[in-house]
Amino acid sequence: MIMEVIRKSFFICNTLNPIQYLLMIRLVYHFKIINILGLNAMTWNNTKNIVQMPPGSFRSIIGYAGESLAIGRALICGYNLFFKAWRDAKYDAVLDANGHLYRIEIKQTTTITLSTSSGGRSGQQIDKTVASREAPLSTIDCDFILGIQSLNGKCWIIPVEIVEILKRKNLALYFLDNFEEKWGIFTYSGTAISTEMINKGFSSLKYTEINKICKAIGLKAPPKPSIKIGKKTTITLTNREWKILNIWLSIYKKI
């Protein structure tokens, strides 16, 4: 949309010469990045690390800041949260939505991707010769990932089943747009889908039960199931994976 407005503006004035064209491309790129990061609205980018902390220390601080922001956003929705008492606990919090409890892993970002893994290590003190234990989050780790853009407070509420299916250590905000500010997921109920199902997920259901839900909501797997998670990234899926993933996506479209 931005590109179309800029393109028309240039043509209204006169025909683009090479310099104008390059300027237009640069301007469009700038607006696209700003829009993806969510910095076209309220932002704290101008006050980021104004005390000039060392980069390593600031990375740790912004992680804690993101966690606090995410907790605050959940509280504003009216959800009650119980926080971890041990720093290295498997998940960060438990969210109570009308008596339904969800294990929550909080992830923050200031870039165009969101980490969806556990076991990652950073810092100068880390022994780089030791094999990394980083792996995509799974249903063993938590129920939902609560992602937050730490420079403006924008949130993404992502079922960990989706990460488990995609097997990705990070996801682009291009794909996460599906889950942006969808706080109502924790209390959702609709055709053939109860809040209890949202709470427990769909991966453990029998295939006949998954097919029953798909039929009720009008989902039919294509001959070659896949999902586009980036402008140039498409992942091949099994029929079962495609159905579970698209059950979730159909729910999110209704919130």
Image: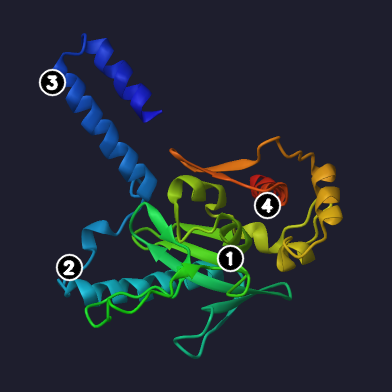
Please state which of the two labelled residues, at mark 2 or mark 3, is closer to the viewer. Answer: 3
First reached walking from the N terminus: tag 1 or tag 4: 1
Please state which of the two labelled residues, at mark 3 or mark 4, is closer to the viewer. Answer: 4
The local crowd at label 2, few if under 14, some if 14 to 19, many if 20 or more residues have their Cα within 10 Å, is few
Q: What kind of element bears circle 3?
A: helix
What separation in Å lies between label 1 and label 3 (alpha carbons)?
A: 49 Å
Percent of width and height locating residue 54: 16, 75
Percent of width and height locating residue 105: 52, 72
What separation in Å lies between label 2 and label 3 (alpha carbons)?
A: 36 Å
First reached walking from the N terminus: tag 1 or tag 3: 3
The residue that mark 4 highlights is 241
First reached walking from the N terminus: tag 2 or tag 1: 2
Q: Give me the residue at 30% from left, 23% from top.
A: 6
- In the image, 110 versus 2, the foreground residue is 110
Residue 98 visible in this rendered orientation of the protein: yes
Seen in the picture, residue 19 relative to 247 is either above or below; the reply is above
What separation in Å lies between label 2 and label 1 (alpha carbons)?
A: 30 Å
Work out which quarter of the rendered image holds the N terminus and state it. top left
The local crowd at label 3, few if under 14, some if 14 to 19, many if 20 or more residues have their Cα within 10 Å, is few
What separation in Å lies between label 3 and label 4 (alpha carbons)?
A: 48 Å
Q: Which mark is residue 19?
A: 3
Occupied quadrant, residue 19: top left
First reached walking from the N terminus: tag 2 or tag 3: 3
The residue that mark 1 highlights is 77
The residue that mark 2 highlights is 50
Residue 191 visible in this rendered orientation of the protein: no
Seen in the picture, residue 89 relative to 198 is either above or below; the reply is below
Amino acid residing under circle 1:
Cys
- In the image, 120 versus 17, the foreground residue is 120
Colour scheme in use:
rainbow
Amino acid residing under circle 3:
Ile
Q: Give me the residue at 54% from left, 59% from top.
A: 167
